[in-house]
Amino acid sequence: MSAFPEGFCWGVATSAYQIEGSPLADGAGPSIWHRFAHTPGHIADGETGNIACNHYQRYLEDIGLLHELGVNAYRFSIAWGRVLPEGRGAINRKGLGFYQRLVDALLERGISPVITLYHWDLPMALQDRGGWINPDSPQWFADYAEVLFRTFADRVTSWITINEPWVIAVLGHLEGRHAPGWRDPSAAARVGHHLLLAHAAAVASYRTLGHGQIGIALNLEPQHPAYPKAADLLAAQRRDAFVNRWFLDALFLASYPIELAQIFGPAWPKFGAVALDQIHYPGDFIGVNYYTRARVAAAPEAKPLGAICLPPPREKSTAMGWEIYPEGLGEVLGWFKERYGNPRVLITENGAAFADPAPCAGLVLDPQRIVYLRSHLRAAAQALAAGVDLGGYFVWSLMDNFEWAEGYSKRFGLYWVDRQTLQRYPKSSAHFYRSVIATQGAVL
Ligand SMILES: N#[N+]C[C@@H]1[C@@H](O)[C@H](O)[C@@H](O)[C@@H]2O[C@H]12
């Protein structure tokens, strides 16, 4: 029996800087990740996105892989700096032309493009104007989005404004582990707010220019007390406000959790009613990027949250050190039905990195990833049966790619990429996912 309805959206996801390579080709302007990756010490294996998977040249081959999988949708991002090298102003027609060819080739194969407008690669020219802390940044983003809405109005009907605003604000501006590498609580709080304003401005623009669906993609992660102790429960609740409700409550409830003012202290701006009303813009769907859960223990010395996350047992961990916890996907999906009015939800990323072996006879055996995907797909099917308005599922990722600060050391793909030749090899999980799509989940 099929676990998913006819018309369910089956896809895979990628992002520009992680797969394209050629970051400066054809007049493209450099991004903050180009600068960050070229700064020694930022990337685990010292690598950059200069080559990545060379998707910029090999995109037709990669569309062939999508066709082989049988997906009906493909989520990818557009590099802002290819389209607007200075981030604003003059359009780079060659850069835009790459994406027009990509979209047309997808449509020819019957694959619906799902375009992410921003997946972390801000043009350096805008960072040199302060980047996302600049109060003009929402308008910069809306103007960039308008160029794409007008270019693709007749062909693309699914858009994601911003990928994981929490990661941009926290890893990029509080912890400094991602570009632009800042460690400034006040900046992180303002960046989070400007990203929400940017999302709202793009949604408003799309309402006048487009006739499809637009949403945002959030990284969501259940926060569970490590032990049945009041202190751990309180620590988990604080971390839930910080990781999950910061953006969920802003988008759906027009309010920030009160814990954020306690966590950020004087660095947390005094947002007024108007500012909060301006971010109350969930869009037409919510994208959920789900990977794992956190087991939280109280740690008063661990400022500012007073909490730490305990590592999972090795036998339940992925290569990223994240716990394999499919129940958490069902929990996250349930939040939307229980708390936020049951909006349309897309699982815009779900997947895992494992220490995949090299190809043998053209195939990579990755049984762990099959177990991971099967268990999470089952959780998604159960949520759907329980009444969650789930419209689609995207595996992260199509192929092994540049895993940000981890470089190429972590492999998330359904296709294995030889780092010397860039040859793509199917993993057994690709064949598994193909069978799931072909049977609408009956094989699960
Ligand atoms: N780490 N990890 C894998 C994956 C990353 O490669 C994506 O770019 C992000 O959207 C999200 O963090 C998830």
Image (cartoon, rainbow, N blue to C red):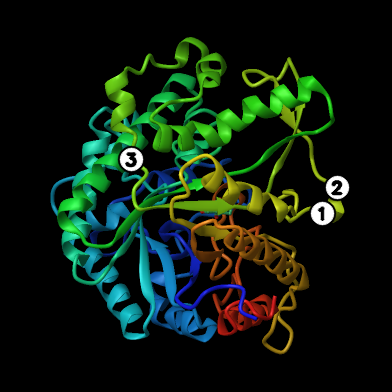
- Residue type, mark 1 in image: Lys
Q: Quarter of the image holding residue 251?
A: top left
Percent across and percent down for residue 370 are: 72, 71
- Residue type, mark 3 in image: Tyr
Left or right position of 290 against 23: right
Q: Is residue 38 visible?
A: no
Separation (CA) of disc 2 from disc 1:
5 Å
> What residue is pinned by disc 3?
281
User: If you read the primary sequence from the N terminus, does the residue marked by circle 3 or circle 2 appear first?
Assistant: 3
Between residues 236 and 45, which one lies in front from this camera angle? 236
Residue at 39% x, 81% y: name it. Answer: 60
- Which of discs 3 and 2 lies nearer the camera? The answer is 3
Residue at the far bottom in the pictured view:
361
Label 1 neighbour load within 10 Å: few <14, some 14-19, many 20+? few
Image quadrant in which the C terminus is located: bottom right
Between residues 2 and 75, which one lies in front from this camera angle? 2
Residue at 22% x, 53% y: name it. Answer: 206
User: If you read the primary sequence from the N terminus, does the residue marked by circle 3 or circle 1 appear first?
Assistant: 3
Residue at 78% x, 53% y: name it. Answer: 317
> What residue is pinned by disc 2?
313
Between residues 71 and 332, which one lies in front from this camera angle? 332
Q: Is residue 399 visible?
A: yes
> What residue is pinned by disc 1?
316
Label 2 neighbour load within 10 Å: few <14, some 14-19, many 20+? few
Asked if residue 69 is positioned above or below residue 241 in the image, the reply reads below
Q: Are marks 2 and 1 in contact (CB under 8 Å)?
A: yes
